[in-house]
Amino acid sequence: MRCLVDVAAVLLAALVAGTTFGILFGYNPAGISGPAYVEVQQGAIRGLNLLIPALAALCILLVLLDAWLSRAARGRMVMLLLAACALIAAGLITRLGNQPINAIVATWNAHSPPPEWEALRDQWWHWHVIRTWIALLGLALLVIATRMK
């Protein structure tokens, strides 16, 4: 059973971290116009705002289950708990940093973004960069843990 939990947790963590990584290196909104930013961001919000946090929550539950199943192997359990902490931190950044901004951007008219659109874009990007690196750390810790006996 532990092997199946390992595979499922790594797969979900890779999907979540990979999504944020892809956005980080494929979608820096700094150079695009306000209307283009709003259209792209609203599309991303519709497609990812519920899916990725749901996958991340399931991943965290699986990592915690894996830690419980690994309680006889203290080093592995501790590494899994560290991975869970990183993934939880990335989730909290999403919930408290990115999603409140997403809720605001979702209400904007793409043809006439509000005057503060760039400031909110930059805040969102700041939180996104941080959560990406923390999610990647969580994934790395999870992979290391799955290699431990």
Image (cartoon, rainbow, N blue to C red):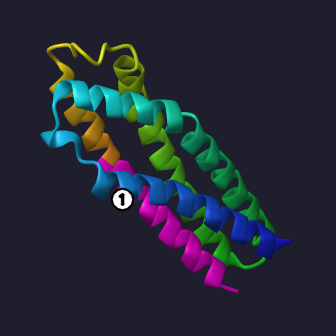
Residue at 79% across / 70% down in the picture?
Answer: 4
Image x and y of residue 82, in percent: 54, 63
Displayed quadrant of residue 54: top right
Residue at 29% across / 19% down in the picture?
Answer: 110
Residue at numbered disc 1: 133
139 falls in the magenta region: yes
| Horizontal side, residue 142 vs residue 31: left or right | right
Quick one: label 1, few (<14), some, or many (20+) residues within 10 Å?
Answer: some
Residue at 73% across / 79% down in the picture?
Answer: 73
Q: Is residue 96 above or below residue 73?
A: above
Image x and y of residue 60, in percent: 64, 52
Image x and y of residue 121, in percent: 23, 31
Q: Magenta region, mostly helix, strand or loop?
A: helix
Q: Nearer the viewer, residue 9 or 107?
A: 107
Q: Secondary structure at mark 1?
A: helix
Image x and y of residue 25, in percent: 29, 58
Instruction: Kindly identify the amino acid type of the residue bearing the numbered disc 1.
Output: Trp
Q: Is residue 111 above or below residue 34?
A: above
Q: Is residue 76 above or below residue 22?
A: below
Q: Is residue 117 above or below residue 66?
A: above
Displayed quadrant of residue 6: bottom right
Numbered circles on residues, count = 1
**In the picture, which quadrant includes the C terminus?**
bottom right
Q: Nearer the viewer, residue 53 or 75?
A: 53
| Horizontal side, residue 130 vs residue 48: left or right | left
| Horizontal side, residue 87 vs residue 34: left or right | right
In magenta, the rendered stretch is: 129-149
Residue at 43% across / 32% down in the picture?
Answer: 43
Displayed quadrant of residue 78: bottom right
